[in-house]
Amino acid sequence: MTLLIIIIVLALIFDYINGFHDAANAIATVVATKVLTPFQAVLWAAFFNFLAYWVFGFGVADTVAKTAHTMEINLVVILAGVIAAICWNLLTWWLGIPSSSSHTLIGGFAGAAVAHAIAVHGFSGYVGEDGTTHYWYEIVSWYKSGKDGGMPSGVLIIIAFIVLAPLLGALASYLISIWLLNASRKVIGPKIFTVALMIGTIWLVSSLMVPYAEIDKPRFDSHFWSVAFDPHNIKWFLVAFIILTVSAFCLIFSSLNLHQADAALKKMQLLSSAAFSLGHGGNDSQKVMGIIAAAVAVFIHTSPPGTHLTSWLDVVLPNDDLGIKGVMPGWIPLACYSAIAAGTLSGGWKIVKTMGSKITKVTSFEGVAAETAGALTLYFTEHLKIPVSTTHTITGSIIGVGLTKRVSAVRWGVTVSLIWAWILTIPISALLAGIVYFLLSVFIK
């Protein structure tokens, strides 16, 4: 029990570090464009980080919890992974490198699990409980096909999104920037496109709404409020609200003078940064929730028969193959969202400088496009239960708006350095976690 509590405390510390390490992702552009002061910006971002508690489900948490097979590891594995993730996060924060907190956590978890498998079984095959031969590398869930043709999961999918997440962010921000630029012209074409997009958005979101009869656990007695505040529905309401707000601005953009347009864009930056902060809180907090849930599941599995388990340990990891629905006590998400919000309040000013000015010069126009694109990308990947990096997403989005000016507007020297940090995060975290695991194994049996 003591080891489990240590893991939970360290996981929440990591969540706090994640908050101030990644605060720049949500506030860099609003600080760079002077829409908010740094203090106002972190308050704004922290509030929406915590508000995500009522918006998002636990899909990403489930994916992270299943990074390694919990029936084949012990608590030392999870402890080593969390310690390695904390070390790498602190190092990159100190150096001002916007690396991925998500990937260092997953890399640490996977690396410690592999080290455990090698320590227990060596490099040769062994016969598992199912009677088949297994190997040390199979302890990590590398790839799993999606149910009924759905999105596959596993570490390889997470690795793929090291490339795909910033590309999606860059493409989305580039297209939004082109849309806004054309909307500023006094021609009818962009307005027709905008109206068509608004109609298409309303139709798409209404078709994706989950009706009351299909909601597993309604939050309210009222049918209306239960549908309105269902996590799945809230996300799509937010997507519609963001797109319709930008669309409304595009319809009047050409009639505004330069001063009026800049003032309107700065107000819209508050919306776009809030939307991104919601996505940041929902995406990154779930990763720590997944680690804590995995630790509790391992504790339950490794406890001697007849051990009395208190209600706060009532955790069940979902299993689609067996039709088992997940159970997570309320204190886990509440603690995780509180920790990341507190961390965001602490800020991370070295990384703010990198994100807000070193990649490309950011104006209110670019800030709206980048944050809107980043938020939509995070909502989309969260819907697919893929734990992507908010750092990679917003960096790609900032690059995308830079490309609308000219290729040379992006400072590619800085960008290449960031990409190297992204590529190295998972392997270095995995290696560091493996070393920490072997060291801890000497003292913890």
Image (cartoon, rainbow, N blue to C red):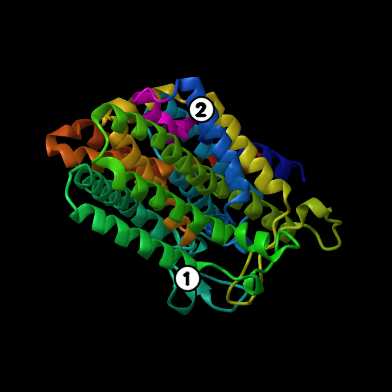
Q: Position of residue 429 (x, y in %)?
A: 44, 42
Q: Is residue 32 one of those drawn in magenta?
A: yes
Q: Residues within 10 Å of mark 1 (few under 14, many from 20)?
A: few
Name the one closer to the observer, 235 or 288. Answer: 235
Q: Secondary structure at mark 1?
A: helix
Q: Is residue 206 left or right of residue 222?
A: left
Which residue shows up at 23% across the image and 41% down it? 254
Q: Secondary structure at mark 2?
A: helix
Q: In the rendered image of this protein, does residue 135 appear above or below residue 382?
A: below
Q: Earlier in the sequence, mark 2 or mark 1?
A: 2
Q: Residues within 10 Å of mark 2 (few under 14, many from 20)?
A: many
Quadrant position of residue 159: bottom left
Q: Which residues are magenta?
A: 20-35
User: What residue would you read off at disc 1?
Assistant: 207
Quadrant position of residue 438: top right
User: What residue would you read off at disc 2?
Assistant: 42
